[in-house]
């Protein structure tokens, strides 16, 4: 599936729009249209139903160590700034950033090379030497490189900031000098690109080129991803600052004691939350995959330390199964355990559920959800103060005065088992999913092109969004075959009977074949048509979106039939 086709469909049919589009848009922000808002809402409601309200507290689920309880929270977006200092976000929630000295654009250091591989100017330059971006040895020709650099349609247009384009003779002289000193030196395309971006090698060393214009990038530097704001009408920006939350998890941790004290929940139990988070991403990209404003669906599951590994495996497998049940599967979905060197300082185990998004290179996967064993890191942090990520076992980080660098609340967030009388700090398993990424994955998985007969029986290519019925924006559409003979009146009666139970759509405009096509693009699983036979035996035709199968049911059975098939 070509990503451009999906993006075009999302705009045309009202799934997704660029935020503030009439003013040129705002990078990293997206608005959900009439169909998109229903799709995303259904994803969140399916998650909440399956994880929280539909959970059976009284029995042991398959694969779980024992029965457990689930409850929910809805915390504020702006919290006390000490929350983020103690959690480590204030000091550590950073990406390494590089700036192009020529075009001034910003890039995440860990994304720069992947962006460079697909840059138009790099592909054009590689073509000169009949090379690919992965070639470890190429045959370099200085005259060919010079011609490319001076060509108005290639170097000068595609990479105006590249050193070899701006000052070709000086730039090429450094490579010529090194080749003369070392005739056996082998050049990979990666190394050659660095030479082409370096104008003053004697002062700077080889430079990293900009994926956008070819200019030289600065050295990596830290960039905190939290959005900063002020609180109060007469706020002092230096004293009264706060942050838009970069994750929903901390709101759950600081309310742990409130939940335990105000309810009858006993460990093990989970607290779920769905809500907005904000990260000032350096390079938001790939449609809604990496955005600056996004929505999370998170669970913080509290358990006894002795059973925490069993609970980690349970949640890892259960969350993978949920995506499969909702329509993702096959080779495009995978569960990947993190290697030891990938783990966060607080984690003893993390697994990612990943999806092969079509905007990624073949064989690459993007994260849908992370399931992390966080140990007692978070509750200890909010009790004692920020823990030193370099210590093992983790200890409170001290300042120059020997006191905690960032003080915790001092509140007791341990748990006492009322049966065994044991007191302990619970361990936490965190399944953290992105509602926007999940919605994007369902969009990608649903997009299908096949052939179906039109109203004249001629085979035509159709675009159909094969959503799972539970998350489809519209559950059913109701059509009168023609706008006469009492058919519209019957169709509207069916529409009104369905409307209190499902999001349904009534359409009487155009040929019925075109109406089917419109609903196929919207992902509507069932279309109900009132025709001539309806007026004789009070039955209607129901058409299945995917199989194109049609069958007849009584008018009064339509609600029950749609409910049964949606599940």
Image (tube, rainbow, N blue to C red):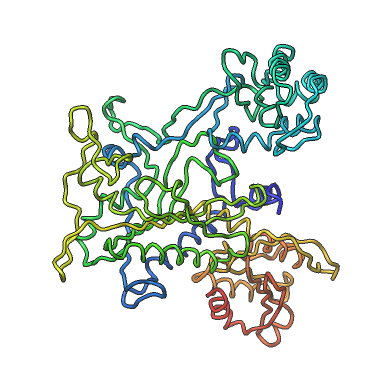
Tell me: 294 left or right of 237. Answer: right
Q: Is residue 42 above or below residue 199?
A: below
Q: Residue at x 45, y 67 (%)?
A: 318
Q: Is residue 174 above or below residue 70?
A: above
Closer-to-camera residue (94/275): 94
Residue 164: where, in percent of width, then height?
Answer: 71, 18
Residue positioned most to the bottom = 537
Question: Relative to 540, is 155 on the left or the right?
Answer: right
Q: Quadrant of residue 457?
A: bottom right
Residue 173 at x, y = what percent?
A: 72, 14
Q: Residue at x 34, y 53 (%)?
A: 374
Q: How many marks?
A: 0
What x and y, as percent, mark residue 154? 78, 25
Residue drawn at the location 16% of the way across and 70% of the way down: 420
Q: Quadrant of the N terminus?
A: bottom right
Q: Position of residue 71 (x, y in %)?
A: 31, 63
Which image quadrant for residue 331? Answer: bottom right
Rendered view: 382 above or below 319: above
Q: Nearer the viewer, residue 32 or 415?
A: 415
Q: Is residue 387 left or right of residue 180?
A: left
Farthest-out residue, left: 421
Q: Nearer the viewer, residue 191 or 288?
A: 191
């Amino acid at each position: 599936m070509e990503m451009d086709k999906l993006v075009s469909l999302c705009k045309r049919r009202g799934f997704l729009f660029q935020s503030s589009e009439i003013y040129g848009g705002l990078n990293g922000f997206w608005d959900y249209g009439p169909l998109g808002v229903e799709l995303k809402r259904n994803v969140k409601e399916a998650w909440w139903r399956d994880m929280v309200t539909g959970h059976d507290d009284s029995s042991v689920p398959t694969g779980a160590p024992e029965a457990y309880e689930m409850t929910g929270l809805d915390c504020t977006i702006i919290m006390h700034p000490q929350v983020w200092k103690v959690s480590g976000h204030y000091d550590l929630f950073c990406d390494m950033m590089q700036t192009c000295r020529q075009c001034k654009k910003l890039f995440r250091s860990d994304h720069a090379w992947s962006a460079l591989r697909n840059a138009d100017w790099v592909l054009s330059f590689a073509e000169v030497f009949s090379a690919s971006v992965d070639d470890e040895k190429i045959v370099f020709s200085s005259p060919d490189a010079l011609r490319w650099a001076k060509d108005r349609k290639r170097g000068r247009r595609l990479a105006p900031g590249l050193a070899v384009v701006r000052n070709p003779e000086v730039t090429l002289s450094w490579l010529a000098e090194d080749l003369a000193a070392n005739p056996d030196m082998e050049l990979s395309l990666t190394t050659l690109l660095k030479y082409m971006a370096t104008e003053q090698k004697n002062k700077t060393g080889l430079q990293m080129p900009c994926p956008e214009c070819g200019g030289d990038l600065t050295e990596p530097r830290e960039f905190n991803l939290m959005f900063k704001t002020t609180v109060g009408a007469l706020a002092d920006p230096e004293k009264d600052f706060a942050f838009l939350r970069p994750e929903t998890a901390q709101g759950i941790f600081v309310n742990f004691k409130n939940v335990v004290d105000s309810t009858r929940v006993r460990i093990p139990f989970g607290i779920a939350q769905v809500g907005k988070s904000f990260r000032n991403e350096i390079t938001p990209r790939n449609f809604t995959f990496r955005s600056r404003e996004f929505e999370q669906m998170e669970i913080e599951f509290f358990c006894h330390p002795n059973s925490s590994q069993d609970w980690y495996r349970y949640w890892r497998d259960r969350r993978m199964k949920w995506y499969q049940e909702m329509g993702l599967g096959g080779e495009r979905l995978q569960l990947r355990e993190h290697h030891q060197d990938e783990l966060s300082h607080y984690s003893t185990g993390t697994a990612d559920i990943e999806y092969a998004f079509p905007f990624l290179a073949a064989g690459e996967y993007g994260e849908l959800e992370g399931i992390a064993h966080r140990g007692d890191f978070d509750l200890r942090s909010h009790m004692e103060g920020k823990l030193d990520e370099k210590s093992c076992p983790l200890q409170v980080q001290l300042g120059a005065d020997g006191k905690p660098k960032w003080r915790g609340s001092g509140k007791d967030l341990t748990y006492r088992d009322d049966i065994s009388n044991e007191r302990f700090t619970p361990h936490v398993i965190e399944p953290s999913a992105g509602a926007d990424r999940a919605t994007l994955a369902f969009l990608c998985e649903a997009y299908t092109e096949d052939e179906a007969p039109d109203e004249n029986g001629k085979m035509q290519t159709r675009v159909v969004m094969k959503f799972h019925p539970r998350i489809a924006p519209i559950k059913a559409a109701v059509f009168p075959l023609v706008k006469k003979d009492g058919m519209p009146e019957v169709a509207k009666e069916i529409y009104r009977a369905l409307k209190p139970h499902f999001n349904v759509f009534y359409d009487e405009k155009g040929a019925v074949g075109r109406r089917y096509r419109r609903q196929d693009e919207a992902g509507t699983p069932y279309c109900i048509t009132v025709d001539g036979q309806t007026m004789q035996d009070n039955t209607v035709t129901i058409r299945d979106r995917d199989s194109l199968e049609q069958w007849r049911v009584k008018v009064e059975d339509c609600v029950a039939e749609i409910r049964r098939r949606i599940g």
